[in-house]
Image (tube, helix red, strand yellow):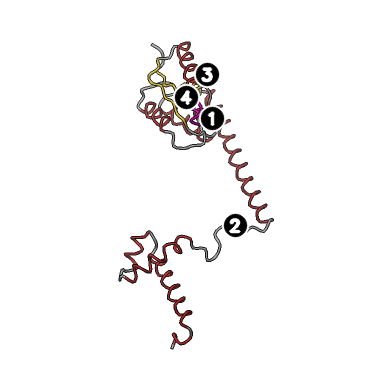
Amino acid sequence: MGQRAAIYARVSTADQSCERQLRDLTGFAERGGYDVVEVFRETASGMKANRAARAEVMKLAQARHIDAILVTELSRWGRSTQDLLDTLNQLSGWKVSVVAMSGMTFEVDTPHGRMMATLLAGIAQFERDMLGERVRSGLAAARARGRKLGRQAGDRPKSDRLAPKVLALIAEGRSYRWIARDLGLSKNTVGAIVGRARAADTLELGPEAMA
């Protein structure tokens, strides 16, 4: 009896099909002598974190119901270099390998696997550095164009949106604490909304309102 394996196929959009991957992987499993326990297919972007079918494969691995995961290529499994490295480390702890149709087997606890893990870690760090550099470059370019970044002074989208509701509840006699809890605001934010409303009323009434 060969190694127990799960087949995992993924496409990015609904107008694509997993059938070719599944056909190729089924043939690969037969040639390699794998005992296919279950077949998984998924339609999800490569960058999507929440992949239900992949999560089910991980559960099988954790329960030690499989020895290997068969994929056409690593990009079908990992959504990023760091994600790939993280899942390979998890699978290594459960003695489960990821096998690509190229014939390459990725097991972190073997000499070859440790070398691959070191390379992947370096690539992941390089990707993070490049992303950080692109973000910094983009921010610098935006500032050079005179664009203001971040939240601006006086910008209160949530409290301004909820201000009419806060004032209505105040008029009903509700406490600041009750309103804050009910609307998901802080007590200080409720107080600030009331304070701004009272200041606006004073300005509308004129100086005689201060007498």
* Residue count near mark 2 (Cα–Cα under 10 Å), binned few <14, some 14–19, many ≥20: few
The tag earlier along the polypeptide, 3 or 1, is 3
* Residue count near mark 3 (Cα–Cα under 10 Å), binned few <14, some 14–19, many ≥20: some
Query: In the rendering, which numbered label is found on residue 126?
Result: none
Judge left or right: residue 17 versus residue 66: right
Instruction: Give the percent coordinates (x, y) of residue 59.
Output: 37, 29
Q: Which residues are magenta?
A: 9-16
Which residue is the site of mark 1? Answer: 117
Please tell me which residue lies in front, 54 or 96.
54
Instruction: Give the percent coordinates (x, y) of residue 171.
Output: 33, 71
Local secondary structure at mark 4: strand
Q: CA distance from mark 3 to mark 1?
A: 19 Å
Q: CA distance from mark 4 to mark 1?
A: 23 Å
Quadrant in the rendering for residue 193? bottom left
Tell me the kind of residue under disc 3: Met
Query: In the rendering, which numbered label is found on residue 9?
Result: 4
Local secondary structure at mark 2: loop
Q: Nearer the viewer, mark 2 or mark 1?
A: 2
| On-image quarter of the C terminus | bottom left
Local secondary structure at mark 1: helix
Tell me the kind of residue under disc 2: Leu
